[in-house]
Each structure stands twice: as C-alpha cells, then as structure tokens.
Amino acid sequence: MNKGTASMKRKKAAAKRAVSQGLIVLGCLLICLIWVLPFLWMLGTSMRREIDSFNLPPAFWPEQWNIENYQKVFDMIPFLKFTWNSFFISASATLAMLVVTSMAAYAFARINFAFKKIAFPILLSGMMIPVSSTLVPLFFTIRDLNLMDTQAAVILLGIYYPIGLLLLRQFMMTIPKSYDEAAYIDGASRLRIFWSIILPMSRSTMIVAAVLCFVVNWNNYLVPLVFLNSEGNYPLTLGMQFLKDSWTIDQTVMLAAVVLSVIPPAIVYITCQKFLLQGVITSGLKS
C-alpha cells in the first residue's frame, strides 16, 4: 500500500512538472508570437501594392506579391549611401566606446582611487537623463568644437554608453585578483595586465556591449537630426524621410525601406549570437 501511494505521488509530481513546463513553453511561444507579428505585418505590407493598403478589412498577407517597392527605394533615395553613413557612424562610435569604456571599467573594477564610489554612480546617472534634455548644452559644445554638420559630432556623442560601462565593470569585478598579483610578481605593468589578461577574459562581455551600442547608434534619429544638415552626411534614419512627398506617404515603399534597414543590425546580431549568449551567461557568474 505504501509503495502504491509513493508511486501515485511520483506520478502526480511528474504530471505537475509536465503541465508547468508545458505552460512555460506555451507562454514563451505566445510572447515570441507577439514580438514576431509586427515584423511579419511589416514584411507583408512592404510586398503590397499601394492601392491594396486601403482595403477593408485589411489582409495580413498580400494577395499579389510586389517586389517593385524595394526597387523604388533605391530609385527614390541613395539608399546605399545612407546605409554606409549609418554603418560608419555606428561602427566608429562602437569601437571608440569599447576603447574608452573598457579602460574606465578596469579602473572602477580593479583600481582604488579617490572619489571612486561617487564617480561611478554619476557616470551611470546618464542612463536616467533623456538625450533631449541635454541637446542645448551639447549643441553649444559641438558648435564651439567646430564639428557642426560633421559625422564626427554624431560619433563623439555616440561614444558615451553607460550600459557598456556597467556590464564591463561588473564582469571585471568577478575576475579573481590573484591574476593581477601573479602578473605583478612576474614584473607586468598595469597596462600589460589590462591588455593581456583582463581584456581577453572580458571578450564576450565586450561583444555584448558592442552589439547593444551598435544597435543604439544605428537607430539614433534625434542626434543626427540636430547636428547634421548636409544630405551627404545623413544616416539611414534621416535619409528615409525623402521617401515621402509634401502630402502623402507610400506606406508600402516606406516599410520596404524599413525592412532593408533592419538587415545590417540583424546580420551583426546573428554573427555575434554565440558570443552574446556566452557573454550574458558569464556576466552573471561569480568567481
């Protein structure tokens, strides 16, 4: 009787686990569907004819696929030029961010200096300040530096990325200090320790910060709008405005341009996906 009762309890526990796991999987699929549906709608609309956009009720998928909208994007604007500008600005800002942020994170994680506990929260407070509230002082600063209407201004403002500093600093704090002590005994300088020990161990976290920073700069609209005037310097976020005229916007062509604009950051994410997962996992581990 006791064996039968124990067996029934095990079966009930297994059934509860199966139900709970099934609910978790179902919930994850539902969340994925909610995230994917807007992208599918965008893709379907980009393949519609303009006249089909006004059909009621609207169809999720177009009855007749139309790839001419993508050709119109290249005919109406210098799409490749704008894409290159976006890539150049995003990549340059990301590389500069990694150089500056990695050194700052190393200092905050491994070096004791005056006002260290005060300076770090001040730097992180930038995450809570909207960019729009700092545009006026930034405008005067960029003007005094003679960087107005240059991509260097947008790159310079894209370097500051507090999330990257937070990620790298938190990871570097988990690296045992014994590595530093052993290197000091061997005669290594602080710069050698940073370059040969800390940076290689932080590679995955640096890639996470780099991808996030690249996407933020790729999607940046407000800063280029304020500091760039010449169309030749426009990134893709500003260049797509030329797809509309004074009165109307062809949504099918606009969404075709949006689909094309998603491809470069998607390629960056897919390429670095392995390192992203590794970085997210290792960032939460303690030594």
Image (cartoon, rainbow, N blue to C red):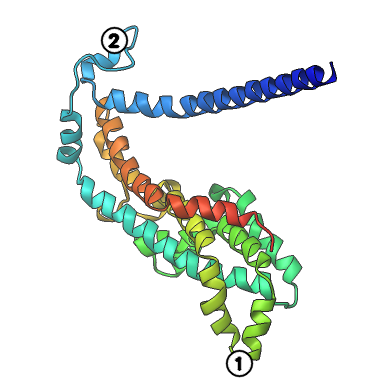
- Please rate how many residues cluster around mark 2, counting C-alpha atoms within 10 Å: few if below 14, some from 14 to 19, many from 20: few
Look at the picture and state if 167 lies above or below 73: below
In which quadrant is the N terminus drawn?
A: top right
Q: Which residue is mark 2?
A: 55
Q: Nearer the viewer, mark 2 or mark 1?
A: 1
The C terminus: image quadrant: bottom right
Q: Label 1 sits on what residue type?
A: Gly
Q: Secondary structure at mark 1?
A: loop
Percent across and percent down for residue 110 are: 67, 74
Query: Which numbered disc, 2 or 1, marks the residue that appears first in the sequence?
Result: 2
Within-10-Å neighbours for mark 1: few <14, some 14–19, many 20+? few
Which residue is at a point 32% across and 50% down the rendered structure image?
Answer: 235
Q: Position of residue 278 (x, y in %)?
A: 52, 54
Residue drawn at x 28%, y 50% is 83
Is the residue 52 above or below the residue 128 in the image?
Answer: above
Q: Amino acid at mark 2?
A: Asn
- The residue tagged 1 is 187
